[in-house]
Amino acid sequence: MMMEPLILEKVEKSFKDGDKENHIVKNLSFRLKTGEVVAIIGPSGSGKSTFLSIAGALQSPDKGKVIVNGTDIATFSDIEKANIRLNHLGYIFQTSNLVPYLKVEEQLSLVLKMANQWTKESKRKINEMLVAVGMEQRSKFYPHQLSGGEKQRVAIARAFINDPEIILADEPTASLDSNRSMSIIELIAKIVKEQNKSAIIVTHDEQILPLCDRIYVMKDGQLMEKGNKSE
Amino acid sequence: MYLLPFKEMTFFKVRYLLISFILFFVAILVFVISGLANGLSMNNASAIINMPVHSIYLQKSAEGRIDRSHFTLDLEKLTAKSEAQPIGIQMGAISKVNSEDKLDITFMSVKPGSFLKPDSKSLEINGGNSVLLDRSLSRTIKKGMIVKDARSGISLKVVGFLDDQTFSHTPIALISLDTWEELAGGSNKSEYNGIAINKTDLGLEKSISSLYKDGEWVKKDQVVKGIPGYSAEQNSLYMMLSFLIVIALFVLAAFFYIMTIQKTVQLGILKAIGATSSQLVKSTIFQVIMLSIVSIAAAVAFTKGFMSILPDDIPFIFDFVQMAKFSGLLFIVSIFGSLLSVFNIVKADPIQAMGRVE
């Protein structure tokens, strides 16, 4: 296993805003280590989401390298990026973003089937994953029958089911109350440690920071480490 | 993955039912109108449509209309060649003996038993004047009755009935050449409307052309189109059909388009977790194929049932070959209708899944 599943080197990204070039991400370098949960905080508009979408193979950077498991994906085509997302990355969104017409267990099997990882073992694996997030009683429910916290648990299970090395979470607690927020982040951290994965959590929910190993602040298109969590 | 389109359809039942109903009813309308066009076509011109002729020699000035064409034929010369047969067509009326009620018919004269009407053998050749009527007249006239030609007053004996013999929506009264000439006033050189042949034979065509000047060979389907009212009837129905199909294209396109726009975010999510555009396009096209097959098949079944409850006097013919053609056309139209949404599926951006509040 790579010790650094995700490395960004001197990444730049800008958007056209009218006539002006708007540099959202400037000369950004970042290394993610296996087994750690990294939190990224910063004011809105500072480029957190852009950073996450580049790290998550949703967008390509204008310049620089994005190395996922030793492969530079900065210049990958859309289909190649989709493949990286499918096999190496797991997403947790602000809202659970579950597929409305699939039952909880089908949300997970869909990912495995798309990745061609469907085997005889898969049913058991899905069940184990649902047990891990405490949703095994709800496996036959549709998303609209679940509460916000339950949906987010399913989304976590979905992010982990295809054994990705990296979990990317975009404001995963934004639509939850503080008790639920803590338990969701605890859950992510627990699975990351148990299964030796890594996670990046973009958030502005300060109360979850103690659960993270490292904290970065996004400011003016760059990431700065904010000491360690004991500070 | 392959169950995904099914699951979506069963989950959003109302949406997909609505769109299937649109297609279902459009298909029914297409099938009913085409069946009606067929039925009217047979009701109008079955006497010519069912006639095994290749082409008919008509007067040039008649412009393809058999009822306007006239030749004075020398039957002795002509009937020697059995491949070329004179044909006479004359609108008229008959009435029952002791009755003033007239029935509109079209007299058609052929040589009994010739290729034009092989089942006309029962017409008496010499002496007694006899007539074979279209079966639609069998409700008022029975076999063996005597009917009178309204114009000349000549009596004709009804020797039988034939199926599907109409010309310009009137039933045919099939008579022999002798009777035709007697009705016309009796002479050896009588007027006929044209000369029919049952296969391409350039030699024969030439010899007839040289015998009777100022004529032209007109193919059977052109003769059918030249029957009074035939083209007007068929064209208006086919215009309706083509508009229906265009409307179907646009309605389906709009429906699929709106449905795709509505689920753009969802497509973005699926892409974010690793689905490719081509998988999603395939899934949508698969849904469209399923919907069209089910709706069109249901419409065919409905039309078949609808036909059996139609009253007899509405001409309606359920033609499987034509039905299959229109089904195919509607199928292609619905696939085309969904192509617009393919662009939207390809365009759907996985980034949309981020930073979105439900």
Image (cartoon, coloured by chain):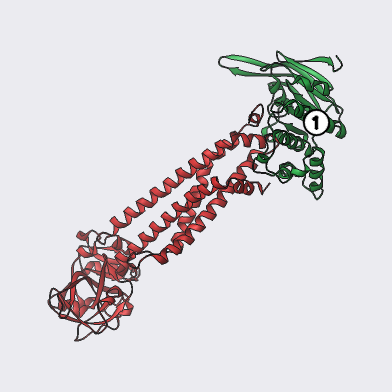
Where residue A30 sits in the image (x, y, percent)?
Answer: 79, 20
The residue pinned by badge 1 equals: A188
Where residue B132 sits in the image (x, y, percent)?
Answer: 26, 78
Quarter-of-image position of residue B48: bottom left
Which class describes the residues within 10 Å of circle 1: few (<14), some (14-19), or many (20+)?
many
Where residue A98 sits in the image (x, y, percent)?
Answer: 68, 37
Q: Quadrant of the N terminus of chain A?
A: top right
User: What colour do you see for chain A?
Assistant: green
| A210 lies above or below B352 | above
Q: Secondary structure at mark 1?
A: helix
Q: Does residue B331 appear in the picture of this structure?
A: yes
Where residue B323 sits in the image (x, y, percent)?
Answer: 45, 60
Q: Quadrant of the C terminus of chain A?
A: top right
Q: Toward the viewer: B177 or B152? A: B152
| B336 lies above or below B34 | above
Q: Does residue A9 appear in the picture of this structure?
A: no
B136 with respect to A189 (left or right): left
Chain letter, red: B
Q: Toward the viewer: A203 or B327? A: A203
A82 with respect to B229 (left or right): right
Return the chain for callout 1.
A
Name the residue type under label 1: Ile
B123 with respect to A154 (left or right): left
Quarter-of-image position of residue B104: bottom left
Q: How many marks?
A: 1
**Residue found 23% across the figure and 58% down from its top:** B63
